[in-house]
Amino acid sequence: MGVVLSEAEWTARAQAHTTRVRAWTGPHHERRKAGVKHPVLDFLFSYYSHRPSRMERWHPGPGVVLEGEQALSYLRWPVYRRVAEGVELDVAAFARDRASTIAFVHRLLTATASRTPRLGCFGLHEWAMVYRQRPEEVRHNAYPLRLGPAGTDAVVETQKVQCSHFDAFRFFTPEARPLNVLRPVRETQVELEQPGCLHVGMDSFKWAYKLDPATPSELVADCFEFAARVRELDMRASPYDLSALGYPPVPIETPEGRDDYVRRQSAFAAEAAPLRTALIELTRTFLPAPTIL
């Protein structure tokens, strides 16, 4: 038997989690009601598909039994079951129902963790997404390009574009795609992803919620908050001038800016490692030992 939490203990944890997450979901709801777009934070709720209402819910993760009458509400999810002491996640049911997702997440994260971080891409993916676009086509066209269209294009043409992340590369403009030294596709994702990539770091949030409701909600929130901080660097290093929103640029078009980017990128790679390890260990809970790669 795993850890047994009294009703007072687990409801306090659930409330603390909801309060923590609503610091992010609350402002998001207010922006949506007001029709206000945010070029940095909207990404966390649009590119990533985990609904705010689901993120606000608390789940204990495997090996935890919840006591009390309120715990019975968890039985509305078929991967929970009643036991003598209360309610717990049904590990076998979750493993059976989500086998392909669990196996893929395990394979991808263990492959990523095995690699040395590659630094020095300088966040050029955001520049490649606006390369040679007309002003009205630029995604965040409410904000100016710091160097203007011609200056932005020149950075893409004079720097080495080496994006390895398929879900970033697929948003490159058609003119920018041939400039990338790699051709990432979905089928090569496991072979190409590496821990220095900012998007790989942010994706710890995606893999956490892909295993919902089996992921402990505190881990989901940790991954979300980490992704939010990485996203800030992602956009500060972008071609957009977001200083009016409180995001001073990391000017990767200069040697000093590139050095600053690499320092920050390296720090984030180190910070992502324990989150990735926690997610790998979570997948091991559901994989039979002979199938672990």
Image (cartoon, rainbow, N blue to C red):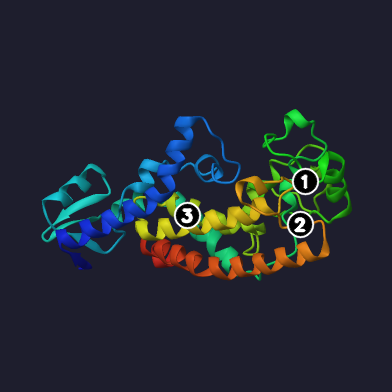
Q: Residue at x 67, y 58 (%)?
A: 192
List x then y, in percent, for residue 201.
57, 59
Residues marked 1 and 2 touching at CB (< 8 Å): yes
Q: Is residue 293 visible?
A: no
How far apart in space, not on screen, are marks 1 and 3 (Cα)? Answer: 28 Å
Front disc: 1 or 3: 1
List x then y, in percent, for residue 90.
26, 55
How far apart in space, not on screen, are marks 1 and 2 (Cα)? Answer: 9 Å
Q: Quadrant of residue 200?
A: bottom right
Q: Which mark is residue 146?
A: 1
Kind of residue at badge 1: Arg
Residues marked 2 and 3 touching at CB (< 8 Å): no
Kind of residue at badge 3: Phe
Residues marked 1 and 3 touching at CB (< 8 Å): no
The residue at which mark 3 appears reads as 224
The residue at which mark 2 appears reads as 251
Q: Which mark is residue 228?
A: none
